Image (cartoon, rainbow, N blue to C red):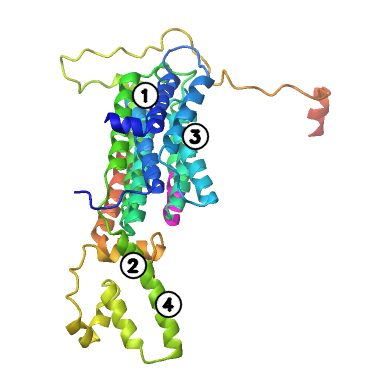
Amino acid sequence: MSAWLQQHPLTFGGLLLWAIGIVLLMPSRSGAVKRPSPVALGLTGFGLAAFLGGFGRTDAALVPELLFWIFSLAALAGGVLMITAHNPVYGALWFAVTTLCTCGLFLTQSAPFLAAATVIVYAGAVIVTFLFVIMLARQSGSAGYDQKSQNTVIACLSAFLLIGAITKTLQTTTIEFNRTAVAAATDQKQSTSEAEAAEDQDPEPVQASAGRSASGLPMTSNSVQLADPLQIATASPPPAPTPNFLSKADEKTPVGSLRGLGRSLFSDYLFAVELAGTLLLVASIGAIAIAPRREEGAL
Amino acid sequence: MNTGTPMTPEELRTLMVAAGLFILGAIGFVTRRNLILLVLSAELMLHGVSLSLVTFGKIHQTAEGQAFTIFVLTVAACEAGLALSLVLSLYRQVHSLDVRLWTELREPDVPQPPADDAGDGTPESAYAGIPKLTPAGVAPRAVPAETMTTKA
């Protein structure tokens, strides 16, 4: 533990500054609506930057690096300002900022469809509805419960213990997945393109390249394997089919492509999609049933 | 034991942004007292979960992370609709959004939390600190009232 603290002073110090900044920014006294103090804002921002910068240098290009820093810093700062907002309207607006920046991070993580869907669902529906409710339940003046938070120090302490534990765990453990398979998929792409180039010159090695791609990448298709009995006889037994193999990305459906996402949703997770539709139906019926009627009196 | 590969700094820091969003939502859920801010904090936690799911999906090169995120989005939409109707029906009963007013389910030996301490007689406007536009330019000439009425 202490060795980890000595190895990553930037991460630890960033977390500490961030926590202190949140405690200082939280609304703590009733009465006057005070502006957030610049000292606390600076502490929080510096802590955020130090925390994110403490994970080592990357070899990414300049533009993805800049996009990551802009989106992640704005998302986290928007989250801090949202939970410390004295006015719930500003809280909802900072939540919209955080949502948009999370969508930007989705884009950098190669999920463009999810970014669009999140913008539509959150910015188009959720934020508007929340603002509507805030305006509906608006009181004359600011309410006392917005000016005073409860259990601030102990909540920040436990939450930052949690994120410290997550940081140490993610930094010190390794993940068991086959990076070589991912690299092999790209190699496969290159080899098939080479094979296609060879096919253009000579029509003979079509069988060989088809057999090789079938044995190298078991999720492509079974019919190719069946079509070549010699290959089945000589090759090693095919690996056991992995669960949810239709969700794996290959060279035709890279991660984040709408084709791959739809294939995963409507084959591997078809029952879950049906359940999600049922959940939406039940939730909308329940929301209509719970909401106060007009004859029950105005708000 | 550790035969895998460690994560690259890009993956690590994106996961940590997700964890940061999650704990910010957790802090907001515990500390704030406005019911609407509680629901918004829960949505912030869901954002963190979605971001880490997408990142893990990219690490493992599968579409499962993004498929799960679509389910998270569905549940978040359901939760927002139900929570808002619940908040409205609670607000109609006590005319306040304070979460401390709803303590019927606490254990009997837990003391009653202090009630809404807004009653210090200082109804502050929420727009107190916002700068206003200074009046500028020439003041418009006052139009006599009969010229406007005789037009019609």
Displayed quadrant of residue B86: top left
- Judged from the image, the secondary structure of the residue bearing numbered disc 3 is helix
- Of all chains, the one bearing label 1 is B
| Residue B74: image location, x then y, percent | 34, 49
Residue A184's tag is 2
Q: Residue at x 48, y 45 (%)?
A: A68
Placement of the N terminus of chain A among the 4 image quadrants: top left
Q: Earlier in the sequence, mark 3 or mark 4?
A: 3
Name the foreground residue: A255 vs B90. A255
Q: Main secondary structure of the magenta part?
A: helix
Question: The residue under label 4 is which amino acid type?
Answer: Ser
Question: The residue under label 2 is which amino acid type?
Answer: Ala
Number of marks in the rendered image: 4
Q: Identify the residue under disc 1.
A: B32
Answer whether residue A155 is magenta in the image: no
Question: The residue under label 3 is which amino acid type?
Answer: Leu
Labels 4 & 1 near each other (Cβ < 8 A):
no
Q: Identify the residue under disc 4.
A: A193
Q: What is the span of residues highlighted in magenta in the rendered image?
A: A112-122
Q: CA distance from mark 2 to mark 4?
A: 14 Å
Assess disc 2: are there few (<14), some (14-19) or many (≥20) residues with their C-alpha within 10 Å of its C-alpha.
Answer: some
- Of all chains, the one bearing label 2 is A
Whether residue A83 is visible to the viewer of this picture, yes or no, is yes
Q: Disc 3 or disc 4, which is closer to the eye?
A: 4
